[in-house]
Image (cartoon, rainbow, N blue to C red):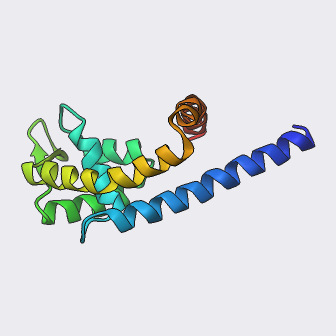
């Protein structure tokens, strides 16, 4: 790799990391009281699924440890936002699905964060954002291959 590519790489990832930090901070502030960003992310993911998932599958989807996912799911279950049940075919496993309360909490959170996201997209410009998406997807795909 050339020095120019090294500099470009460092600049790109510095921007990605700072953008991630700022986005997480802005979204966390906008979320309804008591909801953590990790809770919203899991609820949003589950809301888009047509079938149950195991905690291990969810952990893999988010590149988290099983323990971290179990902790998040336990909090969501305590709040009534997910249902966790035994897998009737394999008693060692559990299956997770979003509850009606979880759908409502996700929708409330989505309504709270959408103006924040929309304001940023409006300020940057829809065309620039549209042009950046394929690059961001390719970066995500390449990074996921490293795991």
Quadrant (top left, top right, bottom left, bottom right) of the C terminus: top right
Q: Nearer the viewer, residue 78 or 19?
A: 19
Residue at the far right: name it.
3
Q: Is residue 79 above or below residue 69?
A: below
Residue 5 relative to residue 82: left or right: right
Decide which of 31, 59 is in the foreground and name it: 31
The answer to whether residue 146 is left or right of residue 47 is: right
Query: Could you tell me which quadrant the N terminus lies in?
Result: top right
Instruction: Specify whether 123 is left or right of 46.
Output: right
Please name whichever residue, 132 or 98, is drawn nearer the observer in this view of the structure.
132
Task: Identify the image quadrant of residue 17.
Answer: bottom right
Q: Residue at x 60, y 36 (%)?
A: 139
Q: Is residue 52 above or below residue 63?
A: above
Using the image as rendered, state which of residue 43 and residue 146 is in the foreground. Answer: 43
Total numbered badges shown on the rendered structure: 0
Confirm whether residue 89 shows in the render.
Answer: yes
Using the rendered image of the protein, determine whether residue 83 is visible from the camera's viewpoint.
no
Residue 100 lies, in percent from the top left, at 8, 48
In the rendering, at what x and y percent does residue 31 appear? Answer: 30, 63
Q: Position of residue 144 (x, y in %)?
A: 54, 37
- The structure residue drawn at horizontal position 24% and vertical position 71%, both measured from the top left corner, is 34
Residue 19 rendering spot, x and y as whole percentages:
57, 55
User: In the image as oriented, which residue stretches furthest toward the bottom?
Assistant: 33
């Amino acid at each position: 790799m050339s020095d120019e590519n090294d500099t470009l790489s460092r600049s790109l990832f510095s921007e990605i990391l700072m953008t991630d930090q700022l986005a997480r901070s802005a979204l966390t502030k906008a979320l309804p009281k008591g909801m953590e960003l990790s809770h919203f992310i899991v609820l949003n993911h589950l809301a888009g699924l047509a079938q149950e998932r195991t905690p291990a599958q969810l952990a893999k989807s988010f590149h988290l440890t099983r323990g971290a996912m179990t902790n998040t799911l336990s909090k969501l279950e305590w709040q009534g936002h997910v249902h966790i049940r035994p897998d009737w075919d394999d008693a060692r496993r559990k299956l997770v699905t979003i509850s009606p309360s979880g759908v409502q909490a996700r929708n409330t959170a989505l309504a709270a964060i959408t103006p924040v996201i929309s304001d940023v997209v409006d300020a940057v410009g829809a065309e620039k954002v549209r042009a950046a998406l394929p690059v961001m997807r390719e970066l995500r795909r390449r990074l996921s291959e490293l795991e």
